[in-house]
Image (spheres, grey):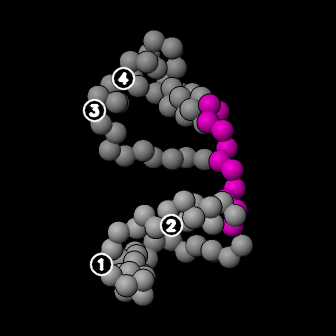
Amino acid sequence: MNITIKSIPDDVGAALKREAEQAHRSLNGEIIHRLSRSLAAQPSPSPVTPDAVADAWAALAGRWKSDLSVEAEISELYAARTGGRDADFTW
């Protein structure tokens, strides 16, 4: 797989180049090395279940502050939603 990374801040690019040279790796090798270590250190996220979503909403219940009715609030939320990517929200 080939990936192009754009707009790397100068200080980050310089640090990566310096670290690559010290480890006798190419810049590409250093980036792959660091990404691999970073991903290996993170546990895989647990799948979101309907029960987890319900628990999250229950934890928020009664904490929402709004002068709008529930129906108006829902309309505002839908109006503010961007198109984004296609997503399947069926369980």
Along the line of sight, which residue is nearer the eye, 32 or 72? Answer: 72
Give the mark nearest the N terminus, 1 or 3: 3
Which circle, 1 or 3, is nearer the viewer?
1
Residue flagged by tag 3: what amino acid is it?
Answer: Asp
Q: CA distance from mark 2 to mark 1?
A: 16 Å
Which circle, 2 or 3, is nearer the viewer?
2
Residue flagged by tag 1: what amino acid is it?
Answer: Asp
Residue 32 seen anywhere in this rendered image of the structure: no
Q: Residue furthest top?
A: 22
Q: Secondary structure at mark 1?
A: loop
Picture quarter with the C terminus: bottom right
Along the line of sight, which residue is nearer the eye, 24 or 10? Answer: 10
Q: From the image, tell me which residue sits under label 3.
A: 10
Q: From the image, tell me which residue sits under label 1.
A: 67
Residue flagged by tag 2: what amino acid is it?
Answer: Ala
Residue flagged by tag 4: what amino acid is it?
Answer: Ala
Q: From the image, tell me which residue sits under label 4.
A: 15
Q: From the image, tell me which residue sits under label 2.
A: 61
CA neighbours of label 3 inside 10 A, class few (<14), some (14 to 19), many (20+): few
Q: Which of the 4 image quadrants contains residue 22?
A: top left
Q: CA distance from mark 2 to mark 4?
A: 46 Å
Which circle, 1 or 4, is nearer the viewer?
1
Span shown in magenta: 40-50
Give the mark nearest the N terminus, 2 or 4: 4
Q: Are marks 1 and 4 in contact (CB under 8 Å)?
A: no
Give the mark nearest the N terminus, 1 or 4: 4
